[in-house]
Amino acid sequence: MKIKFPYGKEHMSLEIPESRINGILRSGLDEYKAKESQEMLIEDALKNPIGSKPLCQLAEGKKHVILIASDHTRPVPSRLIVPPMLREIRKGNPHAEITILVATGCHRETMKTELNNKFGKDIVEHEKIIVHDCDKAEMTRLGVLPGGGECILNRMVVDADLVVSEGFIEPHFFAGFSGGRKSILPGIADRRTVLANHCSEFIADPHSRTGIMKGNPIHEDMMWAARKAGLAFIVNVVLNEKKEVVFAIAGDVEQAHEKGCDFLNSLCRVKSKMADIVISTNGGYPLDQNIYQAVKGMTAAEATVKKGGVIIMLAKSEDGHGGENFYHQLADEPDINQTLNLFLSRKREETEPDQWQSQILIRILQKARVIYISDAPDEIVRAFHMIPAHSLEEAMCLAEFMTGIKNASVTVIPDGVSTIVI
C-alpha cells in the first residue's frame, strides 16, 4: 500500500505491505462538505447563537467594547469573522467604542504586515487595534484560579462594558480543544498566569490530553478566567486542511464552544491501533515549521505506539527548533529523567517558558524512541534525544532494526494534529 504524508508544502510517500498495517488513523474532517459558503456559515451562527442573546442585543447600551481576536500564530480567518461581528455590535449600539485586542498570549508582537494579512487593510486602517503584551500591558488581578495560580488579566478587558471574541476550534494536546475560553487564558493574560496554568503538575495530569476537557485542570482554569473576565459572546469556526471554514458556532463561551467540540469529536475521534512502529506528521505547512510545534503531532502517535516501540515523525522544521528555552531544556542535560524530575520539583509559580513542551516530549521519549524526518540539522535533532532521518525509507529501515521484530506492525497517522486518538 502506498501512503502519502504531508511534509512542508509537499508530500512524502512510502509503500508498506498491507499485511503489516494495523490501521490508518485519519480525521474525517477533510472529507466533510459544508452545506453553505464560509460567509454564510458565520452569518447563520451569528443569527442563531447558542445559550445567549444575539450579539446586537448584548451590545445595546454598551459603550466600551473589546473584541478579542487571535494572533498571527493561528490560521483563523479573521477577515471573514470580524466584519460581521463589528456590524452586529454597531447594530446594537452605533456609538460603541470598539477596540480589537489581539490575543498574543506569550507570543511575540503581531506585526503590521501580519495584521493586514489577517484582518485586511480596511479594518487595520479604520479600527482601533491593540496587540496584547503579557509583560508590559496594564494588568488587573481578579483572584486565584481553581488550580491555585493568580488570575491576572489585561485591564482593558476587565474595564470593558462588553467582551466578545473570535477564534477557531481544533484538538489541543493538553487543553483538550483550542478556542472559546482560550481567548482569555492564555490570550490576554499576564505571563505569570499563563505559566501557572501550564505548570508541570497540570501537564502530568492524565486528563490534560487531546480531546479531554472533563477533569482537565488546564481547561478548568481557562474557563474560570473567561467567566471572571466577563467573556460574553464568542464566534468560533472549524477549519479543514485548506484552512476553509466548514463549521461555525456563536454564543455563550461554554455552551457554544462545547457544540463546536462535539462537532470535531464526531469527525476526528478514532480508536487506537497499537503497533510497534507508528508514523505521524504535523499536517504539513504551516504547522510543521519547527520541532516545538511538531510535539503536537507526536502525541497522537504516543497514544497508539507500544511501550518500547518507535515513532517516525515527519515535520520539515526548516526553522529549526522553534524556541531557545525549549532547545536548552532538552539539549543541556543528557538524562531526560533528571530534566523531568527538575520540572516536577518546581512550584506552580516557578514554571519556566516552554517547560510544558519539553515535559510532553520527555513523556513521549519515555514510552518510545523517535525517528525525526526533517530539514533541521542532524545535531539539533540529536540534541532533542531523537534520531535524525531524511526519508521515509531510511526511517523505516532504522525503525525495523531498532524494534528487532521481523515484519514489525505499523500504524499510520497522516495528520497527527487533527486526529484524536483514544
Image (tube, grey):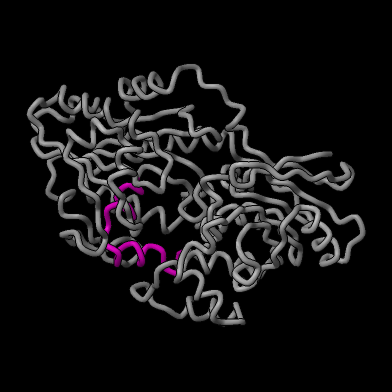
Q: Residue placed at 73% from the left, 46% from the top?
A: 412
Q: Is residue 201 visible?
A: no
Question: Residue 368 sits in which quadrant?
Answer: bottom right
Please indicate whether residue 252 sits to the left or right of residue 342 in the image: left
Task: Between residue 111 and residue 145, name the one nearer to us.
Answer: 111
User: Image height check: is 298 above or below 100?
Assistant: below
Question: Residue 5 sits in which quadrant?
Answer: top right
Q: Residue placed at 36% from the left, 66% from the top?
A: 195
Q: Residue placed at 34% from the left, 62% from the top?
A: 194
Q: Residue placed at 62% from the left, 56% from the top?
A: 298
User: Image height check: is 319 above or below 125?
Assistant: below
Q: Residue 62, position in %: x, y? A: 10, 34
The quarter of the rendered structure image containing the N terminus is top right
Q: Is residue 183 magenta?
A: yes
User: Image height check: is 414 above or below 337?
Assistant: above
Q: Residue 306, position in %: x, y? A: 75, 60
Q: Residue 119, position in %: x, y? A: 30, 35
Q: Is residue 256 magenta?
A: no
Q: Residue 313, position in %: x, y? A: 67, 56
User: Image height check: is 339 above or below 209?
Assistant: below
Q: Is residue 341 visible?
A: yes
Q: Which residues are magenta?
A: 181-202
Please indicate whether residue 70 sits to the left or right of residue 133 in the image: right
How many labels, in total?
0
Q: Residue furthest right?
A: 406
Question: Residue 374 sits in which quadrant?
Answer: bottom right
Task: Between residue 27 and residue 324, name the one nearer to us.
Answer: 324
